[in-house]
Image (spheres, grey):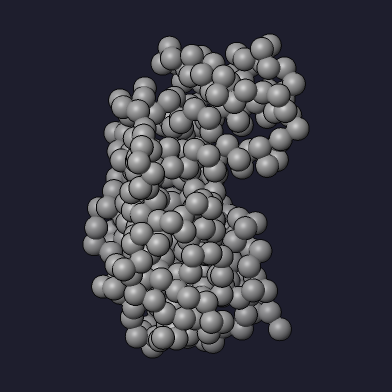
Amino acid sequence: MTVLDTRALNRAALARQLLLDPADMPALDAVTHLCGLQAQEPQEPFIGLWSRLRDFDPAALSDLLTGRSVVRTHMMRCTIHLVTADDALAWRARHAAMLRQRILGVYRREFDGVDLDELAAAGRAVLADGVPRSMTEIARALAERWPEPGPRVLGQMLIVLVPVAQLPPRGLWRTKAGVRNLPYTSWLGRDIDPLDPDGSDPVGQALVRRYLAAFGPAASADLRAWCGLAGLPAAVAAIRDELVTFRDERGRELLDLPDAPRPDPDTPAPVRFLPAFDNAILGYHDRSRIIDDAHRGLSVAGERAVLVDGRVAATWKDEEGTVIVSPLRSLSPAERTAVAEQGEEMASFLSDHESRRVQVAASPH
């Protein structure tokens, strides 16, 4: 079986993630291809798409949110993702058990004796009037009936029991707004797709294909780390005949779509500025294809990353119109120049062309 080294996996991941060459595609198509963008920080998806699309206009993504073509919702790993409305409706039932278990994993004692189906029905009844509410407002409406968890914890459970979208202006470009929730049924005009009654799991099979198109080649453990779903081995087995397999240098079996891009490992990789919590990093169990183990915690902590030669080589932040880059390794003069040039473009994007200031700190010794 062909062994793919770390550099080959890196270039494949960059190609799938639209990070090798800027993609000429509409924002909606990019969100679809990427299986959504992690979005607990509301402005980060704009940075993620700017780094991937040619001539990206942030207004296009805002329009998709207000036009209800994309939604902010709890999905993969029980985190807020920006996904297409079609994917939200198709995937939500398949994620429901995982979402519930993620909350119970932290607050099982608080929900001891609580009938979660009854709680979900009560939450739907509260939201049935079509009035957008915060998580706390939903919980307070039911706190007298279920006092033990407390409003904050009760709210966290309710917004995963009832499929809800976070409404604009939350998540719009350069807009600060609190979270207001409405059920999919109210906001999108139809309910989530039900699970297949015969147990054949077409949604799980589609998730495997979609993940590999955006992240492969990848191991089953990588797929599980991305979506948080444990019950996908049957889906993988059902479509295995469609897939090709490789090994990584650790000997893990990697799955892939036969016609997906696997560029030459020597393909040049331009500097890219990634947003916080970008799935190009978080979408794997073994992240060594894109980030050194020594720096693995940076992505979980919400640090924004700079890719140099395809790998995380620096972090960055924006302070008063200046992009400040902090290298994690020694950068060559050519690399520093490339980072600075891309930092200028990022500063211009974030400031609506009012600033091109960038500071690249000294490399660590």
Q: Quadrant of residue 344?
A: bottom left
Residue 308 is at least partly visible in this image: no
Number of callouts in the render? 0
Q: Residue at x 52, y 77 (%)?
A: 252
Q: Quadrant of residue 62?
A: top left
The answer to whether 300 is drawn above or below residue 94 in the figure is below
Q: Quadrant of the C terminus?
A: bottom right
| Residue 291 shown left or right of residue 93 in the figure | right
Q: Quadrant of the N terminus?
A: bottom left
Q: Nearer the viewer, residue 73 or 160?
A: 160
x, y (%) of residue 222? 51, 64
The answer to whether 331 is drawn above or below residue 280 in the figure is below
x, y (%) of residue 200? 35, 47
The answer to whether 175 is drawn above or below residue 346 in the figure is above
x, y (%) of residue 196? 35, 40
x, y (%) of residue 209? 34, 60
Q: Residue at x 29, y 45 (%)?
A: 60
The answer to whether 260 is drawn above or below residue 171 in the figure is below
Q: Residue at x 74, y 21 (%)?
A: 148
| Residue 139 shown left or right of residue 9 in the figure | right
Q: Nearer the viewer, residue 93 or 27?
A: 93
Q: Residue at x 53, y 30 (%)?
A: 161
| Residue 115 shown left or right of residue 254 in the figure | right
Residue at the front extreme, as displayed: 198
| Residue 154 shown left or right of residue 309 in the figure | right
Q: Nearer the viewer, residue 106 or 35?
A: 106
Residue 84 is at least partly visible in this image: yes
